[in-house]
Image: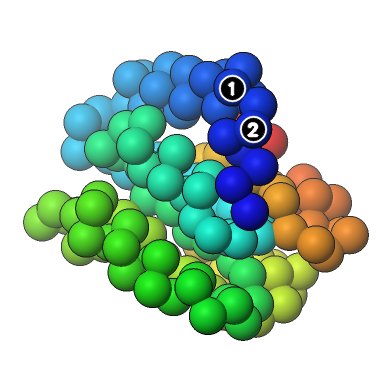
């Protein structure tokens, strides 16, 4: 966990991409970042800090004792607004399956970040992505 901050250029590139895309949408529109593999929440924090329009949808087993408390910290640190009560939403379970369920139930992703231990996650992210999504 925290690997995203080990590579300064990667963190800067991802932040720039998010800011570039959120600057093109209305201030009231949401920009959904879907990530597989929450870990300690480092990537989620980076995405939330990049723009107030970002909502993170994260998929992980959430079987580590620090994960749910860190979700709660992010909820408090990056509060929602009247249109978006929470800027982070988590789905516990096998990310390979939970992501697919989310999409099949009408879930939206504008930006995909695959960092879980599931070998098929990036393939699933691509397979179920709608045109124009950033991976």
Residue 80 position, x and y percent, is 20, 55
Separation of residues labelled 2 and 1 (CA atoms): 6 Å
Give left or right: position of 25 versus 106.
left
Say whether residue 130 is visible: no
Question: Where's the N terminus, which quadrant?
Answer: bottom right
Pointer 1 residue? 8
Judge the density around disc 1: few (<14), some (14-19), many (≥20) Cα neighbours within 10 Å.
few
Could you say which is closer to the camera, residue 98 or residue 40? 40
Question: Where's the C terminus, which quadrant?
Answer: top right
| Residue 54 figure quarter | top left
Please report the residue visible at 10 percent of the width from the left and 56 percent of the height from the top: 82
Residue 58 position, x and y percent, is 53, 61
Say whether residue 28 is visible: yes
Residue 56 position, x and y percent, is 44, 53
* Colour scheme of the picture: rainbow
Give left or right: position of 42 versus 117.
left
Pointer 2 residue? 6
């Amino acid at each position: 966990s925290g690997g995203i901050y080990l590579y300064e250029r990667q963190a800067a590139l991802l932040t720039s991409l998010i800011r570039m895309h959120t600057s093109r949408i209305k201030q009231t529109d949401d920009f959904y970042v879907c990530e597989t593999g929450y870990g300690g929440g480092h990537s989620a924090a980076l995405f939330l800090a990049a723009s107030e329009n970002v909502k993170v949808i994260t998929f992980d087993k959430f079987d580590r004792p620090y994960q749910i408390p860190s979700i709660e910290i992010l909820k408090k640190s990056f509060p929602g607004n009247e249109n978006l009560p929470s800027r982070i939403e988590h789905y516990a379970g096998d990310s390979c399956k939970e992501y697919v369920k989310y999409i099949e139930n009408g879930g939206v992703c504008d930006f995909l970040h695959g960092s879980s231990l599931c070998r098929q996650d990036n393939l699933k992210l691509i397979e179920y992505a709608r045109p124009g999504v950033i991976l």
